[in-house]
Image: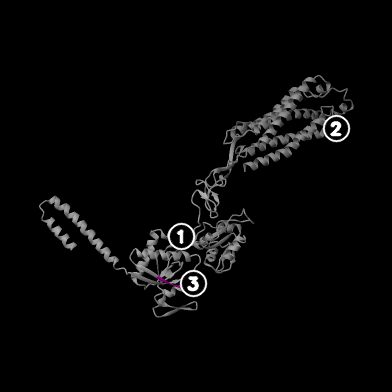
């Protein structure tokens, strides 16, 4: 009746003399006719589905997959109702075998016949498809059909996160376990063991028994007899939902699809509908919902933590784990709710050490000042004149300049600088050394010269009648200038070519690149070359001076103070041998 009415309307429009109106009405009614035809075809297709569909399934019991697949079947029944089909699945438990169970639905197993699997006989008519976590592969597909894959899995690993024996030994991947030589648990002769040993031939496998419960493998892992458990990923994810202190790692070896096998000669309508409904479960996110329900840990909502999700957890810097603990995303954040930012450790010189350094410099400066005052007050005394006041004053000045190096060394910056005092460190030390040592060297060189010239015998017999052998102030300045010139040449090259500058090295960062710890120091690229040249020069000068003191050891003390000069020279050499070596090694370790 509707078709006849439509045709009558089209005829009326055709005889119309208004061409514009006729064109508009033609399009309108053609669209209506097309929609009507589509609706008619849809109703016809829907009516092709049976009102009821009964399928017989072989059910493989599996602790980890049983809940998921049972819920999936229930959802498929609901999806079938949307197509006006009442789906009934008659389940019959079969042995927990996979490839060996496929003959139950192969084309060679016809209704009325029986087949035997692992010593158990089954009726071929009892099964249309099998319910289990089957891995489709070419050999199996040649024997049976498969539904659309509804999940993926792989061989993965799991670790125990509450270690006590080796808390600092954190192994996450099989590669790390192989390099560290730590045991990896796996069921003996299992697919996971074969795959792991093939990928990592040197891995240390510790076998656990194949039982109906995972207690053996988990106990080995919990007792830290092995640090990883290798098995099917979904099986491990199921275990971690039951045992919160275990955690699945990101390891993935050989991705596998999971699907249900069906008879190749299954009724085409039944096969079509089962596939259609599985596809619907995938596209409607039913599979995703079931996956998170059965294979993911139940976590608190964002921003909360605690056993009952009653505690706060900063949503920007942390999240709750399976135990309800607020875990910070980075070690940059701390506190029970991950809201406290950890201050960067700059490894600055402690204030107490700085205070001691300033006090030591102040003490030395005070002694120099007091020594200068004493020298000025008693400059006319015979003992002072005998020791040459100008000589003693230069020693004091050299000590003060050299000690000033302490002030430069305690200067630092919390960032990347600059610290201008860096360049002054070698200059203050070397200039102070040149003045102090050059003065002493001039004096001992004069004594050694007298000894070498053979003037010793008369002087030894009557010191009072002999004119005091002295070193002129000009000779002392000349010697200081020569020693200082050698130092200045090295220092000018160092300053011009590769000057010391402030540099802050990053010691530790979080996974996002934020610096957690750093250390600043005055350094340069070739500092060891120039510092080594200075130390070699100074040690050589000290060694020469000590030699002169030794060969002149029999000259009386009053004759140019040989005894005290020797003590000073040996003391300088000891400082270089002990302190210089220590400082160089310490400085090098900091740079490394």
Q: Is residue 40 left or right of residue 364?
A: left
Query: Which quadrant of the figure contains the C terminus?
Result: top right
Front: mark 1 or 2: 1
Sequence-earlier tag: 3 or 2:
3
| Secondary element type, mark 2 | loop
23 to 145, vertically: above or below: above
103 to 434, vertically: above or below: below
Residue at the image point whose x is 41% and y is 77% from the top: 124
Q: How far is disc 3 from disc 2 in space, using C-alphas?
A: 102 Å
353 to 121, vertically: above or below: above
For disc 2, the marked residue is 554
Query: Which quadrant of the figure contains the N terminus?
Result: bottom left
For disc 1, the marked residue is 291
Q: Is residue 274 left or right of residue 369?
A: left
105 to 444, vertically: above or below: below
Sequence-earlier tag: 1 or 2:
1
Residue 493 on image: x %, y %: 62, 33
For disc 3, the marked residue is 97
Q: Observer-nearest residue: 285 or 99? A: 285
Q: Observer-nearest residue: 105 or 91? A: 91
By secondary structure, the bulk of the magenta-drawn segment is best described as strand
Residue 51 on image: x %, y %: 32, 69
Q: Which mark is residue 132?
A: none
Q: How far is disc 1 from disc 2 in space, using C-alphas?
A: 97 Å
Residue range in magenta is: 89-95
């Amino acid at each position: 009746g509707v078709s006849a009415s439509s045709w009558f309307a089209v005829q009326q429009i055709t005889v119309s003399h208004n061409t514009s109106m006729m064109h508009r009405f033609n399009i309108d009614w053609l669209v209506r006719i097309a929609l009507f035809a589509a609706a008619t075809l849809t109703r016809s297709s829907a009516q092709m589905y049976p009102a009821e569909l009964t399928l017989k399934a072989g059910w493989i019991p599996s602790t980890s997959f049983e809940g998921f697949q049972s819920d999936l079947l229930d959802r498929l029944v609901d999806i079938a109702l949307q197509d006006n089909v009442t789906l009934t699945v008659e389940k019959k438990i079969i042995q927990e075998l996979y490839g060996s169970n496929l003959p139950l639905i192969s084309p060679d197993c016809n209704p009325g016949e029986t087949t035997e699997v692992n010593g158990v006989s089954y009726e071929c008519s009892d099964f249309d498809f099998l319910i289990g976590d089957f891995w489709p592969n070419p050999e199996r597909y040649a024997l049976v059909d498969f539904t659309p894959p509804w999940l993926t899995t792989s061989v993965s690993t799991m670790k125990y996160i509450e270690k006590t024996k080796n808390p600092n030994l954190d192994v996450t991947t099989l590669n790390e376990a192989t390099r560290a030589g730590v045991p990896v648990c796996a069921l003996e002769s299992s697919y996971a063991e074969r795959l792991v040993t093939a990928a990592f031939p040197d891995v240390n496998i510790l076998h656990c028994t194949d039982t109906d419960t995972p207690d053996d493998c988990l106990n080995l892992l919990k007792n830290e007899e092995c640090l990883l458990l290798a098995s099917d990923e979904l099986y491990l994810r199921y275990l971690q939902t039951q045992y919160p202190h275990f955690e699945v790692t990101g390891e993935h070896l050989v991705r596998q699809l999971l699907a249900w096998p069906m008879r190749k000669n299954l009724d085409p309508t039944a096969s079509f509908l089962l596939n259609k409904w599985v596809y619907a479960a995938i596209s409607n996110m039913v599979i995703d919902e079931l996956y998170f329900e059965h294979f993911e840990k139940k976590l608190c909502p964002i921003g909360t933590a605690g056993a009952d999700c009653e505690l706060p957890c900063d949503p920007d810097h942390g999240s709750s784990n399976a135990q309800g603990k607020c875990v910070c995303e980075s070690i940059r954040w701390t506190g029970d709710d991950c809201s406290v930012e950890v201050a960067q450790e700059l490894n600055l010189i402690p204030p107490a050490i700085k205070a001691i350094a300033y006090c030591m410099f102040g003490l030395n400066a005070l002694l120099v000042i007091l020594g200068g005052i004493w020298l000025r007050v008693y400059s006319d005394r015979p003992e002072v004149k005998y020791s040459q006041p100008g000589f003693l004053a230069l020693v004091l000045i050299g000590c003060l300049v050299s000690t000033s190096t302490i002030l430069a060394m305690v200067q630092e910056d919390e960032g990347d600088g600059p610290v201008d005092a860096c360049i002054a460190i070698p200059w203050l030390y070397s200039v102070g050394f040149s003045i102090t040592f050059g003065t002493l060297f001039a004096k001992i060189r004069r004594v050694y010269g007298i000894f070498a010239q053979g003037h010793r015998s008369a002087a030894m017999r009557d010191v009072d009648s002999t004119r005091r052998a002295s070193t002129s102030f000009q000779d002392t300045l000349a010697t200081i200038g020569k020693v200082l010139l050698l130092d200045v040449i090295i220092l000018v090259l160092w300053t011009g070519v590769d000057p010391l500058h402030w540099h802050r090295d990053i010691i530790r960062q979080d996974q996002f690149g934020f610096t957690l710890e750093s250390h600043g120091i005055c350094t340069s690229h070739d500092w060891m070359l120039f510092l080594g040249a200075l130390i070699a020069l100074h040690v050589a000068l000290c060694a020469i001076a000590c030699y002169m003191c030794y060969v002149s050891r029999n000259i009386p003390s009053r004759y140019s103070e040989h005894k005290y000069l020797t003590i000073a020279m040996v003391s300088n050499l000891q400082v270089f041998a002990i302190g210089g070596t220590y400082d160089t090694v310490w400085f090098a370790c900091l740079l490394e």
